[in-house]
Amino acid sequence: MVAGPASSDLANNIAKRLGAQLTVAQLRIFSDGESKIKLDKVGKNCIIVQSTYQPTDTHLIQLMMMAKKCTDDGVEDICAVIPYLGYARQDRVFLEGEVVSIALVAKLFETVGIKHIVTVDIHSQLAMSYFASIQNVSSIPLLADHAYKMKLREPVAVSPDVGGTNRAKEFARHLKIDMVALKKSRDRVSGEVTIDEKLNTDISRRDVILIDDIISSGGSIIKAAEVLHKKGIGKIYAMCAHALLIGDAAQKIKSAGVQDIISTNSVPGEYAKVEISPAIVAALKSRY
Ligand code: R5P
């Protein structure tokens, strides 16, 4: 197993659980931002662990460099564990002239010899459809276990958008709690988010867990928190698989009255409180 520079701790946790030998890829970044990877020879099969959070393009090219080196060394089966798969949100042409970026990413992976991918909570089924062989691991049971231990008051799971309904339903089912999906719309040109303030369920005085796949700028969570606070709810927590939290997003989310942000360690950082390696290892064991 190879630990990519973006996921060294997670790779270590996965290797320990699998009982696999770990090789650490050595990285040098040049002053112009280019990456250089140095990697010892590995065996006939190889698992490379590299999440592609920001800087996404840098982490992607590093992953492809590691895969290319393995291919050149004669590795027959390269499996890439990419907990956060960047570009999955650009899974279709939203505005005329746009590139379906995730389709290009899939082609690039094939070119460097990646045979199989294991990812966590990929943004959409459509994004998944561009890959010939991919396993999508759900972080929901592990996030729900964490939420259960938080001892919240009559908690309700809330999805910030209709697209996240199934995710919030699954989360609510694990916790045996209610769920509500808000109606979010995003201006495709400005990126601005608006949320319909009408709710069909009374959730006043109840604690809320906002559940999403990705928290990036924090715009969706902040808008949802503003709407929910007007309903006289209890405390709000934000949970997600991938806390990208660009710039001061975390601070802005907390200023919007969200008590805490809880994510998996697909993206390392302060809010990566849920260890995702057990779910990844279960998926890998089903393949090997
Ligand atoms: C959108 O469909 C996704 O599920 C997330 O809600 C979105 O990517 C979050 O982005 P941001 O934090 O920038 O609003």
Image: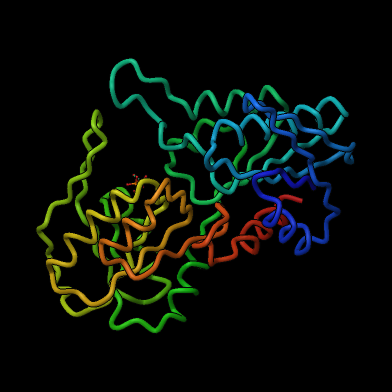
Q: Position of residue 228 (x, y in %)?
A: 19, 65
In the picture, measured across the screen, residue 187 lies left or right of residue 164, that is left
In the picture, measured across the screen, residue 6 lies left or right of residue 38, that is left
How has the structure been colored for display? rainbow
Q: Position of residue 260 (x, y in %)?
A: 39, 68
Q: Quadrant of residue 151?
A: bottom left
Residue sitting at the far front:
31
Q: Quadrant of residue 173?
A: bottom left
| Of the pair 192 and 35, the residue shown nearer to us | 35
Residue sitting at the far left:
198
| Vertical placement of residue 116 versus 269, above or below | above
Q: Position of residue 67 (x, y in %)?
A: 74, 32
- Tell me the residue at 43%/36% (across/down): 126
Q: Quadrant of residue 208?
A: bottom left
Tell me how many marks there are: 0
Q: Position of residue 22 (x, y in %)?
A: 83, 51
- Tell me the residue at 55%/48% (across/down): 136
- Tell me the residue at 67%/56% (across/down): 10
| Of the pair 184 and 262, the residue shown nearer to us | 262
In the picture, measured across the screen, residue 28 lies left or right of residue 102, that is right
| Vertical placement of residue 68 versus 261, above or below | above
- Tell me the residue at 78%/63% (across/down): 16
